[in-house]
């Protein structure tokens, strides 16, 4: 069965990969934290303007993979990455890559809302400010408003833009963090369990937002909730013990998984 | 000595109570501790507290009230001729009686009423001791029986011990507060006496500090001036120089330690920096006077500046070095405590390390940093030794860091050192200075607390 599944995968994968325009492509990615290997030969293609969900049990390496995509692992001591990771065909780990510029192109939203201890306005203006995206105050105002509108937060906070961001509710804070990421006009947005600290209503709002954002951005989302993966994503990759077991159309992964480990995970037998 | 025996007896009784209470609780349930509502040790603890606390409190209160009561009894028993005496004379008389009593039997040659007073004093002391022993041991025993009768399996001894502990904690914090109030009051009374001799406006706004008290009216140099402005200005100048040295260096080393240094480097460097705080201030003092002050003078001389050999700059710089660890160590702790998620949020937006530190980490750590700076500041204002040795005693009203200045603490020391009359304006001035210094540090602390609270509302 297992051999059969592997065969099926190698048969169909090149076809699937060829059909989609790759925004990010990972080939043979290994990640070590000191002596411990966290990812083993990960191959994954992430198409543009889709939501790709990374699912899998805790400690399976999905967050590690996500953090490779904007080189957030660089700030962790003892983290080594090998293999090829490309964004629009350019090697992410090439020596001449400007990490700061890369992170402006690949934005990130974290598990716990982490607004800066500043006003709502300053939070959104932070990125544009450090990258010099606005020439004057009016342009900055415009960026802040557009970003908040795209994150679906503007109407809720328009009369208190200069209040401290920590006064917002958890769900509002998370949408603020999304607005903050959007404000630097990224091409890709990475989301690391963005709803795990939110209540169901706030989660629904953020999921709705993710679906809208797909029009403009490529989104990679790590989630523990399979329902969430099914609701928001078009493609899904299942990670297990540091390997990508299976990836493909979300509907196919959830209705007709090719690997029995995927089957076991989505039916709740492992994880 | 005998009081010590009473206290030991009370403690011994309390310990016996502890063991018996524990034993009784266990015995009542036939050794099955789980049938008790509280552990046996709480029943024992309850016995201990009931037995010891009231009795010890009684001893303390008794010892506090005894001298006044004995004095009143002795004086009221003296012949009528002593009644109209002024209170100062009565004090003197009472001191004589006490001295006579403590000499023991040798009352020969003293006035007969003094001898009578002395023997009365002694007998009162004896009676008091016996009465205290009886009363406090009775209190301990009463507490013992009270607790003993209450021990039943269902008795919630745990809660009772908890509330006793609360009382002990309240008493401890009250003690600290009352000590502060006592210090302020003693400063205040002496200060009021000082302002009887020197007008308050002269002290607070006078520009000349020359604390002399004439022995004779026609003495040379008898003119005195108690204008405190120059010495407060000196304190301010030196503290300012110290802060200019300590805040940037301390803050930058804190940033290095928390953000740039490797874990190993931090483990070595931080304790080394903290050693600076452990150097005795007198060592800093002669470092300032013998090394830094001549250096400053020489360098100033080369640049054509007129530098006094004891300069505010030398003292301020050394003081600044001394307080670097206060700023760096505390700031390092608060910077390290800023959540890593905030840093990641900033890096994730493409911020450089320095941008992240400047725009995200430092603002989030600001309340703690302000706190550490103000702690260092109050340390600088209160510092004495370095200034005595390196900045001189001359009360110059100047903003020139190369001139010799003096500070409040140094003046307090020089006013009180040596043989002094304790009611002269010169000595009392020290208390007034102390009170004003206290008021300044108090205001500083309040401002610090308000700043921290304001920013905490904003940054949390």
Image (cartoon, coloured by chain):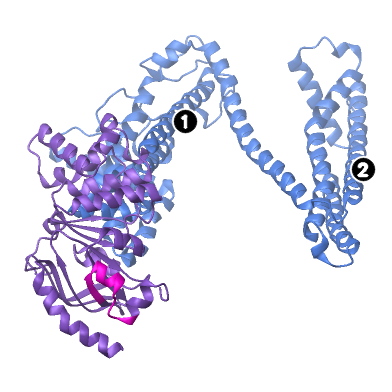
Chain colours: A purple, B blue
Q: Residue at x 41, y 20 (%)?
A: B228
Quadrant location of the C terminus of chain B in the rendered image: top left
Identity of the residue furthest to the front in this view = A255
Tag nearer the camera, 1 or 2: 2
Is B253 situated left or right of B442 in this image? left
Magenta stretch encompasses residue A258:
yes
Q: Residue at x 77, y 47 (%)?
A: B160
Front one among B182 and B318: B182
Determine which residue is flagged by label 2: B138
User: What range of the chain is rendered magenta?
Assistant: A246-260
Determine which residue is flagged by label 1: B414
Q: Secondary structure at mark 1?
A: helix
Q: Position of residue A13 (x, y in %)?
A: 16, 79
A167 over A48 or under it: above or below: above
Q: Residue at x 25, y 67 (%)?
A: A250
Q: Residue at x 75, y 49 (%)?
A: B161
* Res B164 → quadrant: top right
Q: Secondary structure at mark 2?
A: helix
Res. B298 visible in picture: no
């Amino acid at each position: 069965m297992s051999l059969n599944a592997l065969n099926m995968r190698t048969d169909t994968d090149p076809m699937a990969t060829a059909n989609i325009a790759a925004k990010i492509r990972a080939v043979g990615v290994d990640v070590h934290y000191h002596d411990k290997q966290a990812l083993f030969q990960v191959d994954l293609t992430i198409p543009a303007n889709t939501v790709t969900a990374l699912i899998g049990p805790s400690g399976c390496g999905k967050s590690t993979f996500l953090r490779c995509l904007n080189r957030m692992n660089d700030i962790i001591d003892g983290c080594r990455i090998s293999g090829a990771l490309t964004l629009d065909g350019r090697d992410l780990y090439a020596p001449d890559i400007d990490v700061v510029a890369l992170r402006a192109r690949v934005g990130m939203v974290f598990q716990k809302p982490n607004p800066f201890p500043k006003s709502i306005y300053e939070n959104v203006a932070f990125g544009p400010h450090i990258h010099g995206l606005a020439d004057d105050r009016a342009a900055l105002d415009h960026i802040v408003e557009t970003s908040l509108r795209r994150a679906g937060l503007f109407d809720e906070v328009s009369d208190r833009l200069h209040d401290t961001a920590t006064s917002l509710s958890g769900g509002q804070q998370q949408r603020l963090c999304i607005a903050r990421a959007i404000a630097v006009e990224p091409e890709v947005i990475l989301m690391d369990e963005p709803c795990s600290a939110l209540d169901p209503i706030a989660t629904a709002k953020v999921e709705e937002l993710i679906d809208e954002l797909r029009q403009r951005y490529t989104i990679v989302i790590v989630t523990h909730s399979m329902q969430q993966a099914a609701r928001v994503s078009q493609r899904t990759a299942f990670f297990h013990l540091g390997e990508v077991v299976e990836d493909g159309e979300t509907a196919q992964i959830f209705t007709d998984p090719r690997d029995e480990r995927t089957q076991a995970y989505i039916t709740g037998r492992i994880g | 000595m005998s009081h010590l025996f009473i206290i030991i007896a009370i403690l011994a009784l309390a310990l016996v109570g502890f063991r018996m209470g524990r034993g009784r609780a266990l015995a009542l349930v036939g050794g099955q501790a789980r049938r008790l509502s509280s552990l046996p040790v709480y029943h024992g603890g309850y016995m201990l507290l009931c037995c010891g606390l009231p009795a010890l409190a009684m001893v303390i209160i008794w010892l506090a009230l005894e001298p006044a009561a004995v004095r009143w009894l002795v004086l009221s028993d003296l012949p009528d001729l002593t009644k109209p005496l002024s209170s100062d004379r009565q004090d003197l008389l009472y001191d004589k009686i006490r001295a006579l009593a403590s000499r023991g039997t040798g009352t020969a040659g003293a006035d007969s009423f003094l001898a009578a007073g002395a023997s009365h004093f002694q007998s009162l002391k004896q009676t008091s001791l016996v009465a205290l022993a009886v009363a406090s041991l009775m209190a301990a025993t009463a507490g013992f029986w009270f607790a003993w009768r209450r021990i039943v399996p269902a008795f919630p001894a745990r809660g009772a011990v908890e509330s006793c502990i609360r009382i002990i904690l309240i008493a401890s914090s009250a003690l600290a507060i009352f000590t502060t109030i006592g210090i302020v009051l003693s400063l205040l009374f002496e200060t009021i006496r000082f302002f009887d001799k020197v007008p308050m406006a002269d002290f607070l706004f006078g520009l000349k500090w020359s604390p002399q008290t004439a022995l004779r009216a026609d003495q040379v140099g008898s003119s005195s001036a108690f204008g405190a402005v120059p010495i407060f200005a000196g304190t301010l100048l030196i503290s300012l120089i110290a802060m200019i040295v300590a805040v940037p260096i301390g803050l930058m080393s804190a940033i290095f330690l928390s953000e740039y240094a490797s874990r190993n480097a931090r483990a070595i460097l931080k304790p080394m920096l903290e050693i600076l705080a452990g150097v005795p201030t007198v060592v800093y003092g002669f470092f300032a006077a013998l090394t830094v002050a001549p250096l400053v003078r020489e360098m100033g001389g080369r640049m054509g500046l007129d530098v006094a050999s004891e300069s505010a700059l030398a003292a301020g710089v050394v003081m600044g070095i001394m307080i670097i660890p206060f700023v760096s160590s505390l700031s390092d702790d608060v910077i390290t405590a800023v959540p890593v998620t905030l840093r990641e949020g900033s890096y994730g937006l493409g911020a450089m390390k320095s941008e992240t530190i400047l725009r995200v980490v430092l603002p989030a750590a600001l309340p703690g940093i302000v706190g550490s700076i103000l702690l260092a500041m109050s340390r600088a204002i209160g510092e004495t030794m370095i200034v005595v040795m390196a900045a001189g005693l001359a009360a110059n009203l100047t903003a020139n860091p190369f001139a010799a200045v003096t500070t409040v603490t140094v003046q307090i020391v020089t006013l009180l050192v040596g043989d002094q009359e304790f009611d002269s304006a010169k000595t009392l001035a020290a208390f007034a200075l102390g009170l004003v210094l206290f008021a300044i540090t108090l205001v500083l602390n309040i401002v610090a607390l308000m700043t921290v609270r304001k920013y905490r509302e904003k940054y949390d």
